Image (cartoon, rainbow, N blue to C red):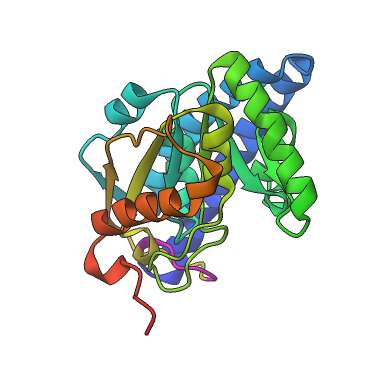
Amino acid sequence: MNVLSSAIRQLTGLVLMALAVVIFFALCLLLLPWRVTRIKVCNFFGHVMGRTILALTGSEITGDPKPAMDAAMPAIYISNHTSPVDVFLGIWLAPFGVCGVAKKEVAYYPFFGQLYLLSGHLRIDRGNRDSAIEALKNIAVLVKRHRLGLWIWPEGTRSKDGRLRGFKKGFAHLALATGLPVVPVAVAGAHRIWRKNSWLLHPGELNVKVLPAIDTSSWRLETLDEHIAQVHAALNAALPPEQQMVAEG
């Protein structure tokens, strides 16, 4: 796709996003006292705008991952992160009642970030460990009380080359606190469609695999590293070789 076509598609997406944000921002203001309702209203926003933006990027999604996502709810959904495409894929796939966990910088994204601030979804400060831990504890209480799910990218930041990176421990602590199963979602091809730090789009196939839920009821703090390694191995094995983590040494 050439530069002009990419620019037109992205401008179209930005305009549609702005219009949708105005509507849903107003709804969230009306629903300000009810956080769980705001989360679910913004899930609907994600279902509509996520799929719209994916279409504008030329992402051709293979299969239908949504039934498997819905069947696992409530759960902690974790996925690899290689491209801006992942954000729109995530908000489209997330079932109603799934709370997103994003870095605090999401607030700077045009339009989307401002709605996220009001949505009730969680922002964490990765540079402040104590603040991040407290935020995760608070969301765990909300999740258990209202049978919500969670979506988190456990690598912490986007991969530069499309390969899986190591996991941060936040998702595992959430599993300990909530008792929810962990559902790995392997996304292949997103890094080729919309590369990191690039505005040029390359339409292509986006393969999404929703893996079987991993039971966390027996997880313990003392063996947390082993459980994280188990989840990482499952997600890594589901990715194509060119996106699998390269073993050190």
Q: Position of residue 179 (x, y in %)?
A: 50, 28
Q: Which residue is at a point 23% across and 68% down the rendered structure image?
A: 241
Along the line of sight, the residue nearer the viewer: 213 or 173: 173
Identify whether 115 is placed above or below 58.
above
The stretch drawn in magenta includes residue 37? no
Of 249 and 159, nearer the camera is 249
Q: Quick one: 1 or 158, which is closer to the camera?
A: 158
The reply to whether the magenta stretch includes residue 194 is yes
| Residue occupying the far left of the picture | 63
In the picture, measured across the screen, residue 13 lies left or right of residue 234, that is right
Which of the 4 image quarters holds residue 205? bottom left
If the image is split into quadrants, where does the C terminus sit? bottom left
**Image coordinates for residue 83, horizontal then vertical, percent:** 46, 60
Residue 13 in sight here: yes
Percent position of residue 210, x then y: 29, 40
Magenta part, dominant SS: loop
Residue at the far front in the pictured view: 222
Left or right placement of residue 77 versus residue 113 in this view: left
Query: Where are the magenta residues, as a range?
Result: 193-197
> Viewed as shown, does residue 157 lie left or right of 60?
right
Q: Residue 19, image x and y in percent?
A: 63, 34
- State the quadrant of the N terminus: bottom left
- Front-most of 67 and 9? 67
Q: Is residue 30 above or below residue 19?
A: above
Query: Residue at coordinates 79% horizontally, 14% vertically from top-left?
Result: 33
Judge whether residue 53 can be spotted in this image: no
State the residue at coordinates (59%, 47%): 170
Q: How many marks?
A: 0
